[in-house]
Image (spheres, helix red, strand yellow):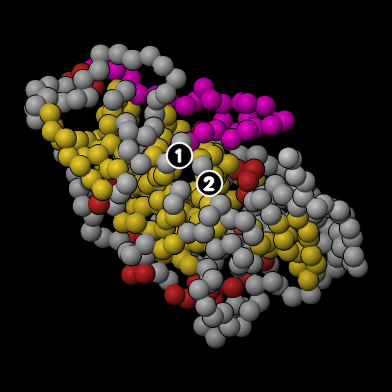
Amino acid sequence: MSRNWIAFPRTEGSASRQAHCDLPEGTFERELGREGFFGPATHMYHRNPPTGWIRFEGDLKPRAYDTTRLGVFGPTPWDASGLLHNARVKIRIWEMGNSMGQLARNADGDELLFIHQGSGHLYCDYGHLEVNEGDYIVLPRSTMWRLESEQPMRVLLVEATGGAYQLPDKGMLGPHAIFDPAVLDTPVIDERFRAQQGEDEWQVLVKRQGRVSAITYPFNPLDAVGWKGDLAPVRVNWRDIRPLLSDRYHLPPSAHTTFVANGFVVCTFAPRPFERDPGALKVPFFHNNDDYDEVIFYHAGEFFSRDNIHPGMVTWHPMGFTHGPHPKALQNAFEQKSEGTSEVAVMIDTRDPLEAGEQAGAIEWDGYVNSWKEEPNK
Ligand SMILES: [Fe+2]
């Protein structure tokens, strides 16, 4: 039986007819929304900023982690630092100083690599791909792969546990908007790939249900001479993403969706101009994203809606927590001093609540919950 939301748009008291625009004088707008910006929502107009708390106690509090403080990494992706996880997603940080001496294979789900720093080469079942800062690489479940570094690579790893990455439905924009599927690169069987084949002994570290098994071959199993099919790793750089924008309306983060997996989405915030309509909000609106936990990895640029955040940091806003622009950013809500934002960030919105990993506590910025205060040290 199909079900419908109990939906009945009403207006009570003083409110704007158009979300995120022309707010009643002196008010702060908060969106109370379901289904991650796609379900029923109400816009409420408050006298005070909804993040104006003076005390915040308990487990719900927003977290910020400084992953630049993670210093020691093991040689394989299975040694990466686990930051946040639930049954359907695992978010990890890994730095690979030297090239991988073993092959990795994730039997638990597709793996998404986002290259925060560094460059090198990916060798996998399907061939060779160059890897550079700002690349996303989707590795289908159980692909054998290894990285060779030219510059040490720091990588954000996002495992779609038990699931697969797909492209979002582009709806009325058509399939070529944001990025054309033709910009997705796939590995090639080139000279470099052939040159790494041979009779040396190679070990494959296969992760299944979080436990690693080692399979040893007396040759390099990345020995394909060709392949055909519609399953393959893909690479796309954030520079190939042409973000949606509206001159007259602040689009929700979901407009920046890059990949969809089971139980979560990955969005990319790429540089874009600010809205110009005098009545349109020019910073994210206050909201409860009540059905999703929100995680943002800050990659590069100036993060226009947050104060005191630098590249390599991660913020986590659990569902049920109201958030929005920081006080300094809020001053620019209707008047930005520059033409656009230079921020580059990866957002991971998860349908199920996340848990922090063991290594997260050591790099947590405890003062984050107070960063919405006008004077954060009070
Ligand atoms: Fe949010």
Residue 130 on image: x %, y %? 33, 30
Disc 1: CA contacts within 10 A as few (<14), some (14-19) or many (>=20): some
Identify the main secondary structure in magenta.
loop
- Residue most extreme to the front: 1
Is there any visible trace of residue 193 in the rendered image? yes
Residue 349 on image: x %, y %? 54, 51
Residue 107 on image: x %, y %? 32, 38
- Give, as a three-letter code, the residue at label 2: Gly
Give the residue at mark 1: 163
The residue that appears at 30% across and 61% down in the rendered structure is: 70
Which type of secondary structure does the marked residue at label 1 adopt? loop
Is there any visible trace of residue 311 in the rendered image? no
Q: Which residues are magenta?
A: 165-192
Left or right: 217 as drawn, with respect to 342 = left
Disc 2: CA contacts within 10 A as few (<14), some (14-19) or many (>=20): some
Residue 263: image tag: 2
Q: Is residue 296 above or below residue 268?
A: below
Q: Quarter holding the C terminus?
A: bottom right
Whether the magenta-drawn stretch holds residue 323 is answered as no
Q: Quarter holding the N terminus?
A: top right
Q: CA distance from mark 2 to mark 1?
A: 9 Å
Do callouts 2 and 1 mark residues in contact (Cβ within 8 Å)? yes
| Front position in the image: 369 or 169 | 169
- Give, as a three-letter code, the residue at label 1: Gly
Count every numbered label the image shows and give the total.
2
- Which of pointers 2 and 1 lies earlier in the amino acid sequence? 1
The residue that appears at 71% across and 57% down in the rendered structure is: 33
The residue that appears at 80% across and 53% down in the rendered structure is: 6
Left or right: 201 as drawn, with respect to 255 = left
